[in-house]
């Protein structure tokens, strides 16, 4: 039987493919419709996401909502939101390369179901597999293509909470995301 987002979410919640399953409270498969046009990949679920099983809530989630509505000017109904790893890393540490690699299989399966117009990587952990580990300062607002899929690199919304100087770069990234999606529609 073909995968659906719901069937993948059930599998992800049971997944034990990397050590992060041991410390998670709830896996966070992602949220959005199978008809989504834009597929956002963030870093990892935070503490609040771990408790609720939902991505992009809390302060970074609020910032994400503002960037999507005010800068990209895109409706929420056309977005799918997920992360490079779907289980919260202990003590908010960075995800390890082998954890990201293990979880990338779920990314691929969700992409196969959704077939979005545009994939947007948020921050360096999401960008690295597509942009060869280049620094965010060099690749943000850039497009690339991999296996026929168009991919756009943006800063992570949480970056501006720690470095307010990145707020204008984030606005630029999201304005361009909106323009690219409207151009491709
Ligand atoms: S992070 Fe991904 S690969 Fe690792 S256990 Fe969670 S769902 Fe599975």
Image (tube, rainbow, N blue to C red):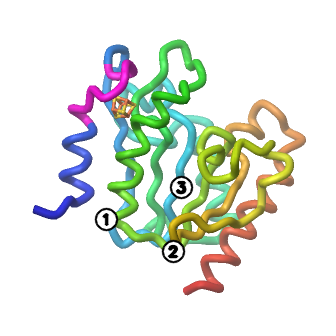
Give neighbour class at mark 1: few <14, some 14-19, many 20+ (Cα, 10 Å): some
Q: Secondary structure at mark 1?
A: helix
Q: Which residue is mark 2?
A: 117
* Highlighted magenta segment, given as a residue range: 13-21
The numbered mark at residue 113 is: 1
Residue 120 in the image: above or below residue 134: below
Question: What SS does tag 3 mark?
Answer: strand
| Residue 165 picture location, percent across and down | 89, 41
Q: Earlier in the sequence, mark 1 or mark 3?
A: 3
Instruction: Examine the rendered structure and indicate whether residue 40 appears above or below residue 14.
Output: below
Q: Secondary structure at mark 2?
A: loop
Bin the neighbour count of mark 3 within 10 Å (Cα to Cα): few under 14, some 14-19, many 20 and up: many
Percent coordinates x, y for residue 109 in the rendering: 33, 55
Residue positioned most to the right: 165
- Closest to the observer, 104 or 57: 104
Q: Position of residue 15 (x, y in %)?
A: 26, 32
Indicate whether 112 appears above or below 130: below
Q: Position of residue 26 (x, y in %)?
A: 31, 28
Residue located farthest toward the left when viewing the structure as drawn: 1
According to the image, label 3 marks what residue?
40
The residue sitting at 60% across, 59% down in the picture is 120
Q: Is residue 72 left or right of residue 163?
A: left
Quadrant for residue 175, please give it: bottom right
Residue appearing at x 35%, y 64% in the figure: 112
Q: Please identify the quadrant where the N terminus is shown.
A: bottom left
Sequence order check, earlier mark of 2 and 3: 3
- Mark 2: few/some/many CA within 10 Å (<14, 14-19, 20+): some
């Amino acid at each position: 039987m073909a995968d659906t987002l719901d069937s993948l979410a059930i599998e992800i919640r049971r997944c034990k493919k990397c050590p992060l399953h041991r410390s998670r409270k709830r896996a966070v498969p992602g949220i959005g419709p199978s008809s989504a046009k834009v597929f956002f990949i963030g870093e990892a679920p935070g503490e609040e996401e771990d408790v609720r099983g939902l991505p992009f809530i809390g302060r970074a989630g609020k910032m994400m909502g503002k960037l999507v509505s005010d800068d990209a000017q895109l409706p929420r109904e056309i977005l799918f939101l997920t992360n490079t790893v779907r289980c919260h890393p202990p003590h908010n540490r960075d995800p390890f390369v082998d954890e990201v690699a293990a979880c990338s299989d779920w990314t691929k399966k969700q992409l196969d179901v959704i077939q979005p117009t545009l994939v947007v990587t948020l921050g360096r952990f999401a960008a690295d597999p597509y942009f060869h580990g280049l620094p965010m300062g060099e690749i943000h607002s850039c497009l690339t293509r991999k296996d026929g899929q168009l991919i756009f690199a943006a800063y992570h919304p949480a970056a501006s909470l720690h470095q307010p100087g990145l707020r204008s770069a984030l606005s630029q990234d999201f304005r361009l995301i909106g323009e690219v999606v409207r151009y491709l529609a």
